[in-house]
Image (spheres, rainbow, N blue to C red):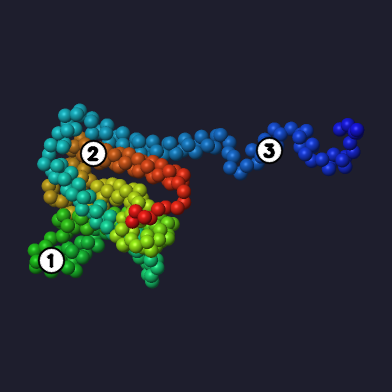
Amino acid sequence: MKTPQSQTPAARALSPQEDNASSPAKPVARRSRTSSPTSEPAWVKWTLISIALGFIFLFLILPLAAVFTEALRKGADAFFEAFKEPDAWSAIRLTLIIAAIAVPMNLVFGVAAAWCIAKYEFRGKAFLTTLVDLPFSVSPVVAGLIYVLLFGAHGWFGPWLQAHDIKIVFAVPGIVLATIFVTFPFIARELIPLMQAQGTEEEQAAMVLGASGWQTFWHVTLPNVKWALIYGVILCNARAMGEFGAVSVVSGHIRGQTNTMPLHVEILYNEYQSVAAFAIASLLALLALVTLVIKSFVEWQFERDMRAAAALPPERPLAAL
């Protein structure tokens, strides 16, 4: 019997398993790790993390800290005194009213537009999708000027509105219209990609099983898009409460009547009431933080539902319809 030392080179070439077993595995693993295109040195990772944290600190944490610091600079009594003014309460109330009107209207429009674009094929579909994105590219100031041109005293419909004693510009209806314009893409843009990715198979199956259009929407479509819908509503509400440019053009800055919270902050700051201005601004910042917390919760809940859905069998019962 031949020993390993007595084998010829040809015999050793014909026994790769024995050769692989006798060769060390560590150098091969080391070569595969170093040749991986996704491997990066540790300093690259920590440099990127440091840059990201630096930007977050400089453009987010530091301004928020400055707002709350200036608001409490003269103590808690001066801070709460800013909220005792009737104009402040009027601005807070008007801001909440505007959001309560604009968000549901954008909810209806967003669902209808997303359903139309994602579920149907028709001429002009690309043009409609472009129109949905229009407020993202148009300046809010331009949006406000559009409504002044349409409904102002010297606008296209101004004489007719004056004849019927209807006031839109420099009144609450104009603020509502401007807010709806700048916020209506948020819900639609969250729903359209998701509905397009899901297709129409489940809705068609529900209709074949005898479900009506409303039952199909309520039991099939809505559960599939509920988290995207909630996410869009959160973003729409945050933008509605913080909108400044378009509202500033159409409101007229009438204190106690057409001033929202952002406009009230500007007026107080221009009048050198810095503590009161930063106090109202801190309330806006607090609302933004609450919105961020709710947004994070919705994202976490969505990811949990996706993991749970991945563990279920692919068939989905439709008998409940």
Residue at the location (32% across, 39% down)?
Answer: 293
Residue at the location (35% across, 51% down)?
Answer: 223
The amino acid type, in three-letter code, at marker 2 is: Leu
Residue 189's spot in the image, x, y percent?
36, 55
Q: CA distance from mark 1 to mark 2?
A: 36 Å
Residue holding disc 3: 31
Residue holding disc 2: 283
* Position of 121 relative to 56 (above/below): below
Residue holding disc 1: 161
First in sequence: mark 3 vs mark 1 = 3
State which mark lies toward you, 2 or 3.
Answer: 3
For disc 2, the neighbor class at 10 Å (few under 14, some 14 to 19, many from 20) is some
Camera-side residue of 28 and 220: 220
Residue at the location (13% across, 37% down)?
Answer: 84
First in sequence: mark 1 vs mark 2 = 1
Residue 76 falls in which quadrant of the image? top left
Residue 79's spot in the image, x, y percent?
19, 32
Residue 138 falls in which quadrant of the image? bottom left
Q: Secondary structure at mark 3?
A: helix
